[in-house]
Image: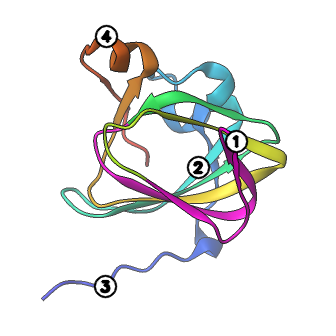
């Protein structure tokens, strides 16, 4: 029998990605790190992963991919994927190994990111195009 895990938002604060990675090397551009706050809801080894990201107005998620499939659900603001703009309540499913980028709307954006397994991969556009090995992000805490 499994154990139920709760997340109470009143007990967990957002952390800026610069602080979350605490000087550890990451392929994510510094401007993107500085414009992004994270709050990890659930991250179980060999299990489900759910985290919440809050982007500053106009913040860019540079072109990248991950190993695992992911579902992004916009909670507040707007998130632009190319010509498509997603508002609160909208979602997008990105298959693993798919290159994508996004831009936060003029008022910023908050979204939930769900993955079926913990995934710390971050495949840059250059790695994707050249088929080189992807970077592993330091674990978020």
Q: Helix, strand or loop at disc 1?
A: loop
Please say if 37 is above or below 65: below
What residue span does the magenta drawing correspond to? Answer: 66-93
The first of marks 2 and 1 along the sequence is: 2
Residue in the image at 43% along x and 80% along y:
6
Q: Which residue is mark 2?
A: 38
Residue at numbered disc 1: 83
Query: Pointer 1: residues within 10 angstroms few (<14), some, or many (20+)?
Result: few
Query: Which residue was labeled with disc 4?
Result: 130
Disc with the residue nearer the chain's start (4 vs 2): 2
Q: Quadrant of the N terminus?
A: bottom left
- Residue 141's place in the image compared with 73, above or below, is above
Residue that extends furthest to the bottom in the rendered view of this protein: 1
In the foreground, 141 or 83: 83
Q: Nearer the viewer, residue 1 or 129?
A: 129
Q: Quarter-wise, where is residue 16 in the image? A: top right
Categorize mark 3 by other alpha carbons within 10 Å: few (<14), some (14-19), many (20+). few
Task: Tell me the residue that label 3 is attached to.
Answer: 4
Q: In front: mark 2 or mark 1?
A: 1
Q: In the structure shown, which secondary structural element does the residue marked by tag 2 occupy?
A: strand
**How many angstroms separate mark 2 from mark 1 (CA)?**
25 Å
């Amino acid at each position: 029998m499994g154990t139920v895990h709760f997340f109470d938002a009143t007990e967990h604060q957002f952390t800026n990605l610069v602080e979350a990675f605490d000087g550890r090397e990451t392929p994510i551009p510094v401007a993107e790190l500085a414009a992004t706050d994270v709050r990890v809801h659930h991250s179980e080894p060999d299990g489900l992963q759910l985290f919440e990201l809050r982007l500053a107005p106009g913040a860019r998620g540079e072109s990248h991919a991950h190993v695992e499939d992911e579902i992004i659900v916009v909670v507040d603001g707007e998130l632009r994927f190319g010509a498509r703009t997603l508002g609160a309540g909208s979602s997008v499913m990105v298959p693993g190994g798919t290159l994508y980028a996004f831009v936060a709307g003029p008022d910023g954006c908050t979204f939930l990111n769900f993955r079926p397994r913990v995934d710390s991969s971050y495949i840059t556009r250059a790695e994707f195009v050249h088929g080189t090995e992807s970077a592993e992000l330091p674990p978020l805490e």
